[in-house]
Image (spheres, rainbow, N blue to C red):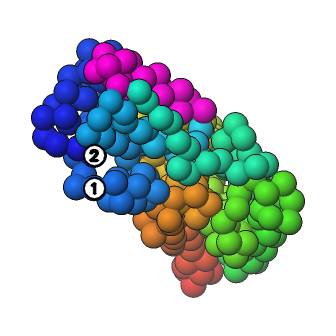
Amino acid sequence: MGTTEQAEQVTAGLEAGLPGGFAVKRYADQRAARHALKDRKVYAAYITGSGKSSELLYAGANGPSVASTVTGAFSGVAKASGVRLTVQDAVPASAGDTRGMSVFYAGFGVVLAGFLFGMMTYQIAPSLEYRWRLTSLFTFSVLGGIVVAVIAGSAGFAALPGPFLGIAGVIALMAAAVGSATMAFMRLFGRAGMSLAAVILFTFGNSTSGGTLPTAYLPDWLHPFSKILPVGVGVRAVQGLSHFNNDGLTVGIVVLVVWILIASATLYLCDARVPRREAVA
C-alpha cells in the first residue's frame, strides 16, 4: 500500500532480489491490504509510511516457508530504501500447528485411506451390489470426516480451528472423491487402474496439494493439478475454513462433488446397468 511511485520502487527492489518471484498489487489503503491478506489474495502486505518507517504484514498460517520468503525479501527492500521495517503476523498459525503442516497430514491421510478403501472394496468384494458399495463408501467417508475433525479440531490438538461441521464435511467429501475415483479406475482398467489411481490421486495429488508449500511455489505446469485434484481443492478449502475467510471453500466443494458424481455414474454404468442388460439377453 502506498503511492504509485512507492509501488514501483518496491517492485524494482523485489525484482532485484528475486527476479520473477513476486507479483505486486497496489491497494488504496491499509484496510484493503489487510482484507486481501486475510482473504488469501496476497501472501504479504507492505505498508509504506510517510516517514522513515514501513510495516510488513504476512500470514503465518501459510507456513514458515512463505513467512521466511516474504520477510527476507521485504527486509532487503526496506534496507535499500533506508527505512525501518516493522513485521506483523496478521494471520497466525494455530497454537497446535506452529509449522503449518496439519492440513497436509490430514489431506495425506485422507487420500491414502480413500485410495486403500477404493482398492480393497473391489479386491475383497468384487461382486458387491452397486447400492451397497456406495453405502459403504458413504459410511467410510462420514466416519473419516468426523474422526479427522475431532483429532485436528478444537476437541483435539486445535490444529485446524475451523468450524467442526465444515472441516468434517470437506474431509468427508475428499474421502468420498478419492475412494469413488479409485473404484472407477479399477472398474475400468482392472489392476492397471490401481496404479493409475495411485499416480494421479496419491502422487500428483499430494505433491501439488499446497499443504507443505503454496501452489505458487510449484512449477507452472503443476498448477492445474492443484485446482482439479481432490486433495488440492480439499486442502485449500480446509485452510480457508481455518484461517482465510473461507477462501477456496465453494470451488473445493463443487470440484469434489463433481469427482464423486462422475465416479458414481461410471460405477453405475459398469456395475448396475451392465449386469441387467446381460440378464435380459
> Are discs 2 and 1 less than 8 Å apart at CB?
yes
Q: Residue at x 20, y 23 (%)?
A: 12
Mark 1 Cα-neighbour bin, 10 Å: few <14, some 14–19, many ≥20: few
Could you say which is closer to the camera, residue 235 or residue 245?
Answer: 245
Q: Is residue 77 magenta?
A: yes
Q: Amino acid at mark 1?
A: Asp
In this picture, is 9 found above or below 195?
above
* Location of residue 45 by image quarter: top left
Dominant secondary structure of the magenta stretch? helix
Quadrant position of the C terminus in the picture: bottom right
- The residue that mark 1 highlights is 29
Residue 194 in sight: no
Q: Earlier in the sequence, mark 2 or mark 1?
A: 2
Q: Secondary structure at mark 2?
A: loop
- The residue that mark 2 highlights is 1
- Image coords of residue 238 (percent x, y): 60, 59
- Image coords of residue 235 (percent x, y): 58, 52
Q: Residue at x 41, y 27 (%)?
A: 84
- Image coords of residue 198 (percent x, y): 63, 40
Numbered circles on residues, count: 2
- Locate residue 215 relative to residue 115 in the image: left or right: left
- Image coords of residue 192 (percent x, y): 60, 40
Q: Residue at x 51, y 59 (%)?
A: 244
